[in-house]
Image (cartoon, rainbow, N blue to C red):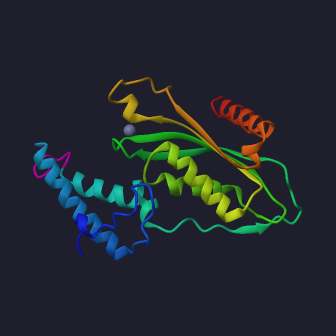
């Protein structure tokens, strides 16, 4: 098995999952192939990965980190979600956050970190899921090469599909290290914030303000 371009399903974008999750054997081959290529890259960059004790195992370590951590949401199935009937027909806005967000930018391979907030307006006919599942969903979609605008949509579309709420909001506030460590080298306090709304939340400015105000309050509480 090899991982040359022609074998990659090119229809898949960098922030989408492959058609099928890959198993442990495929994963091991992928890590070994990527480590070889990283050794080559180090050679090109004149970094001695054979004799320098600091970088001796770095190609292997970085290959493993990409496959098993940074990009794992590309190679694995979505988190298992236990859904409950909305037995009491709870129909008010539920907001959860800040949810830790760690991702990597598709343009520069630099970390993106910050927080996500999810607002759910359940429907009597839909499902509700345990609060910790929102953290797992955020982490799953963030563990790919991402674009923040698309990440927000992917998280929301998935929750809508799984739980059929009356309305939903997803907001991400994050630092992009491609902007703080290179280019304009902006302050680490400089964030990108974006929010998407679905269903009744998209239609009601009152619900939108309720969600956004709660996000600000949660953010403030989290930084105290
Ligand atoms: Zn970037």
In the image, is residue 84 part of the stretch drawn in magenta? Answer: no
Q: Nearer the viewer, residue 15 or 188?
A: 15
What secondary structure is the magenta-colored segment mainly?
loop
The vertical placement of 112 against 186, above or below, is: below
* Residue 24 picture quarter: bottom left
The vertical placement of 2 against 194, above or below, is: below
- Quarter of the picture containing the C terminus is top right
- Quarter of the picture containing the N terminus is bottom left
Q: Nearer the viewer, residue 47 or 209?
A: 209
Q: Position of residue 113 (x, y in %)?
A: 49, 40
Q: Residue furthest front?
A: 203
Q: Is residue 48 visible?
A: no
Say which residue appears at 88% left-offset and 61% top-offset. Answer: 89
Q: Is residue 69 visible?
A: yes
For ligand 1, the image quadrant comes to: top left
Q: Nearer the viewer, residue 196 or 32?
A: 196
In the image, is residue 50 part of the stretch drawn in magenta? Answer: yes
Q: Which residues are magenta?
A: 47-55
Say which residue appears at 22% left-offset and 59% top-offset. Answer: 35
Q: Position of residue 13 (x, y in %)?
A: 40, 57
């Amino acid at each position: 098995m090899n991982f040359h371009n022609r074998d990659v399903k090119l229809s898949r974008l960098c922030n989408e999952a492959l058609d099928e999750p890959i198993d442990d054997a495929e994963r091991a081959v992928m890590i070994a192939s990527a480590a070889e290529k990283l050794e080559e890259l180090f050679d090109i960059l004149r970094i001695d990965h054979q004799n320098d004790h600091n970088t001796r195992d770095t190609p292997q370590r970085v290959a493993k980190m990409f496959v098993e951590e940074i990009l794992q949401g590309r190679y694995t199935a979505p988190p298992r979600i236990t859904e409950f009937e909305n037995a009491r027909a709870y129909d008010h806005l539920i907001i959860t956050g800040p949810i830790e967000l760690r991702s990597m930018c598709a343009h520069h391979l630099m970390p993106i970190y910050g927080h996500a907030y999810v607002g759910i307006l359940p429907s009597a006919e839909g499902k509700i899921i345990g609060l910790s599942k929102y953290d797992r969903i955020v982490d799953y979609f963030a563990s790919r090469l991402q674009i923040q605008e698309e990440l927000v949509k992917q998280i929301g579309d998935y929750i809508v599909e799984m739980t059929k709420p009356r309305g939903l909001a997803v907001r991400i506030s994050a630092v992009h290290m491609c902007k703080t460590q290179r280019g304009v080298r902006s302050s680490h306090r400089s964030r990108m914030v974006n929010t998407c709304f679905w269903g009744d939340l998209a239609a009601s400015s009152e619900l939108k303000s309720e969600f956004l105000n709660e996000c600000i309050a949660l953010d403030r509480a989290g930084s105290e």
